[in-house]
Amino acid sequence: MKRKTTLFFILAFITYITSGCSTQPKPLYTYGDYSEAYYASKKELTPESALRLQKSIEYAIENSGESSSGRVAPGLYANLGYIYLKTGNSSKAIENFKKEKAIYPEAAHFMDRMIKKVEVAQGKTDEK
Amino acid sequence: MKNKQYIILLLSLVSVLILSGCGPAHITKGSAFPKMYEQQPRSLLILPPMNESTDAEAKDYYMTTIEMPFALMGYYTFPTEMVSDIMKQEGVYDTEILYNMPLTKYYDYFGADAVLFTSIKKWNVSYAVIASTLTVSIEAKIVSTKTAEELWKYTGTVVVDLSGGNSSGGGLIGLLAKAIATAINTASADYVHYAKIADKRFIYTLPAGPYNRHYMQDQSVELINQTKQH
């Protein structure tokens, strides 16, 4: 009988611990180590730190489903698009700007402006 | 006669009780920031911080901490890095100029409902032989791009005692060695860590944004008068 009660307590304790872990509220968005990577790139901008920042954004986008909103955090697609723009990949830049706008209508005005800018620049290079 | 004295004593006791109870006034989000609920801004344009501290690098480092807490509070936050770069491309390099621009420009260019201004008041370590302290103090305010009204304002300050436990000793030489160790160990990453804590201190006073499930339902949430502590 005594054994049973100890067993019960052990089981109860285990359930308590595991349930404690699972009830942690999920954050609104997934960021991964975006903040740390952003800081590292500000501290010293190297090809490595720039790549780390891009990777952290891509990770946050891929894992957005794990957040409570299930959405990609504001600005992440825009940031990724901007990274592509800086490396000369206009089509990927536009693609990401469009994604930002699709999730967040608040960004539409700014993203349309950016897309237009990229398209004008593209037109100029095509003419050359 | 005796009765009167008792009454006076009782009255004074009651008044002391009431007065002391009233000390930290109970302010709610709704009463402190009514304009946030009236105007209901959905998007925040985060401008590069104004650096009033003595540390030249504080601006760049602090900038990396602002976006996340405001987004998590439910607002659409424009990508800070991109916005800052674009302002430079438009010929505006100086933060001071950015902070004095007509606010309607931010609405016309970005479509932002409101602008978030941040100012780094303190970002330093004061070294002393016995106790060194790190201070990060940030002032933040949200201003409407439509009416130019200030919708929300708060200051977050974190003061940290860096000397830690007093177990390692050895008289004055030991203390001196500790002060030097503190100076060496206070890397920029520490500042960023405490800046994030300062952010947390003021972010919780902010009414929830449209992407937060408490949007337009947190008017009665009480704000605790925050004093400098850690």
Image (cartoon, coloured by chain):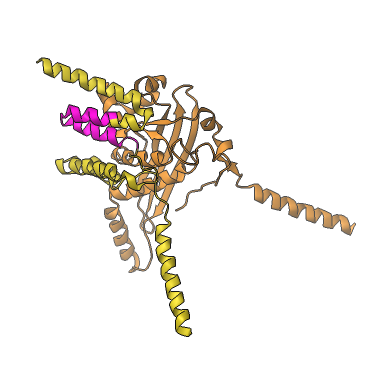
Chain colours: A yellow, B orange
Q: Where is residue B54 in the image (x, y as percent from the top left)?
A: 33, 40
Task: Note whether B48 is above or below A49 in the view shown.
Answer: above
Question: Based on the displayed image, in which of its 4 quarters is residue B3 positioned?
Answer: bottom right
Q: Position of residue B75 (x, y in %)?
A: 42, 35
Residue at 30%, 52% (x, y): give it.
B186
One can see residue A59 in this view: yes
Q: Position of residue A26 (x, y in %)?
A: 40, 50
Task: Note whether B114 is above or below B225 in the view shown.
Answer: above
Q: What stretch is highlighted in magenta?
A: A74-98
Q: Count the marks.
A: 0
Pick the residue in front: B127 or B228. B228
Q: Is residue A14 magenta?
A: no
Q: Position of residue B12 (x, y in %)?
A: 76, 52
Question: On the rendered structure, is A71 left or right of A126?
Answer: right
Pick the residue in front: B8 or B79. B79
Pick the residue in front: A99 or B39. A99
Question: Based on the displayed image, in which of its 4 quarters is residue A125 positioned?
Answer: top left
Task: Note whether B214 is above or below B87 in the view shown.
Answer: below
Residue farthest top in this picture:
A127
Q: Does the magenta stretch include residue A84?
A: yes
Q: Is the magenta stretch mostly helix, strand or loop?
A: helix
Residue farthest left in this picture:
A128
Question: Based on the displayed image, in which of its 4 quarters is residue B84 positioned?
Answer: top left
One can see residue A43 in this view: no
Task: Note whether B183 is above or below B81 in the view shown.
Answer: below
In which quadrant will I find the N terminus of chain B?
Answer: bottom right
Residue at 44%, 31% (x, y): give it.
B42
Pick the residue in front: B113 or A104. A104
